[in-house]
Amino acid sequence: MGKAIGIDLGTTNSCCAYVRNGKPQVVTYRDGSRTIPSVFAIDKNGNRLVGNEARDQAVANPNHTIAASKRLIGRNFGSSAMQKMQQVFTYELVEGESSEVLVRVADQVFTLEQISAAILRRIKDSAEEALGEEVDQAVITVPAYFNDRQRQAVRSAGKLAGLKVLRVLNEPTAAALAYGLGRTLNQRVAIYDLGGGTFDISIIDIKDKIFEVIATGGDTFLGGVDFDDRLMQWVLQEFVDETDIDVSYDRSAVTRIREASELAKISLSDTHETDIDLPQICSDEDGNSVDLRMTISREKLEELTEDLIDRSIATCERILQEAGTSREDVDEMLLVGGQSRMPLVRRKLQSFIGQPPSNKVHPDEAVAIGAAIMAHSLSSKAGPQDMTLLDVLSMAIGINKVDGTMHVLFAKNQPLPDYKTRVLTTSKDNQRSIMLRIYQGESKFVAENELLGTFVFSGLREAPKGQVKIEVTFHIDSEGILNLTARDINTGQLVESRLKLGKDDSSSRRGGENRRRRRRRQSQPQQPQQQQSAPQQRQPEPASQTPPPALDMPRRSSLAAERPDRRGPPTIPPPVGAHGRSAHDDVDLLEPEPAQMAAATPLGSAHHTPASGPAMDPFPIGRTPGGGHRMDGEPDLPVAPKGCLGSFFGLFS
């Protein structure tokens, strides 16, 4: 068995660490850096590039360079979150058959799992080079505020990269492990993690080798890229005011300005003024080259971004209240993530918490080091086996009710693992199936939460309405990933269950118009998806007319050729009842009786853990896995063994 490593898969940069001779070490790359840009690209020659190579050619190739893809992974294309994010990406986003987000790069369509797998594969190769031995296991970190779908997507990406994912670990928790290494502590710490694309705050009690998360929360739309964007927008507007030239339509120019804005922001953490100097950023009406030169002060940057920091502190205050603790009870506030280096962040946090933030962990490396400690613990008998990690659920999980509200099964900050049972009953005579939608989020209304998936319990025995009662056991594991089993209470028979990866009604309505637009464009020359990345929007450049060799959306196509660990996005035809109508009906939910709750058992065995084995090609385009296809081109529907549904997306991994 190979070596286990810890990976901080970041939005803008990723870091990797391992434990050797009992001490964690960060992998150093060939160029001497200890992080790698989380960027993927395909150049004009068709070469796939990752890391610095991809980032360095982004200015010349902005349409085919994928950055910050972590913000998209595991999301539903029709969700309100996606509508917001589409405004800031220069590359084309495509809706998949199961409403997943795909990206079109150089006339090829990729899943977000494939993009992340390419980055993970580069990290794996670099770790093997540094260690001089095979690496086949990893603990991968995610923002604490990631939901079930996003966590499963990261697991799938790890498997595509040839890694057995030992655990998906919350980033603030990993930082706490790094902080507690080698110390005998009895403290309550707050982990303030302001990274490149996300913000997390966790309140954690550390008692010797016991790490107990009390409360966690965050904002998946708050990170360093938002600070970059604020400065970039200001630079664009200043340039318009000075020259009367708007370059916001020019993706290459916008990419250059974004990169310069990021460098200026970083520089202003150490200096009070810095310059942006971009020669030949554009041409005027007479064809003369125009340069962009301006000086930016730290005060101006703070003025542009102060409200973003205030947003993070408001979240901190809310999480402290949820933890039932006060600022005075916090012994240390640890700063993690590159954006936490900003002086204004430190000043505001010191004012908020009443003491200077701690400098005892490295902002860029602490998460990877904590992941490496956990990986060593899980993979080595010589590891710290007495280390105990007690985590909580970052967002509530529940099911939809008839009135559109969410019946909460697992509350936010629920200690993990845990399980609940609920009883479903039929609402019509001779009803043969029940459909149950699962949501995750903090709103009381399901339409405002993320649809994790839809389970269909089929093959029910015929009986008058209300006579068939199905006991469903929901088990959530230590990673915050949900598993289900079901049985008929009256007969004791396990119920056949299927997972439907698709849209809820609201997202279907939102996506319907998009599909109609795509169909209307089929008879017209294809244009790239319009992306807004600056104050004003101009006509985009014409797209290549060469048809993509992989997924040509919106043509119906199985994603099995794209993802060998899944059998494809299922389309479930509604079962036909006795009178020829759909037998998927509304569910009557009965509260569990104490005896039923006591009879249920945790379902740890149902949790899918990818097996180790030979590395898989992260880009298996054109490869068809085992399993047939029906004549209509739709993939066979995966069916879980009776009574064992596995995790939501484990059925396809």
Image (spheres, helix red, strand yellow):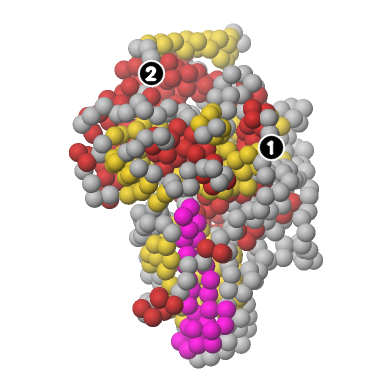
Tell me residue 346's x, y (percent): 30, 26
Q: Which mark is first along the chain, 1 or 2?
A: 1
Total number of numbered labels? 2
Q: Do the residues labelled 2 and 1 touch (CB within 8 Å)?
A: no
For disc 2, the neighbor class at 10 Å (few under 14, some 14 to 19, many from 20) is: some
Q: Taking the image as drawn, is residue 246 in sight? A: no
Q: Quadrant of the C terminus?
A: bottom right
Q: Name the residue under label 1.
A: 134
- What is the span of residues highlighted in magenta in the rendered image? 465-494
What is the CA distance from the residue labelled 2 to the residue labelled 1? 39 Å
For disc 1, the neighbor class at 10 Å (few under 14, some 14 to 19, many from 20) is: some
Tell me residue 336's x, y (percent): 40, 32
Q: Name the residue under label 2.
A: 269
Figure check: 354 above or below 160: above
- Residue 285 occupies which quadrant of the picture? top right
Q: Residue at x 60, y 83 (%)?
A: 577
Q: Which residue is drawn at 50% across and 87% down?
A: 490
Type of amino acid at the residue the image marks with label 2: Ser
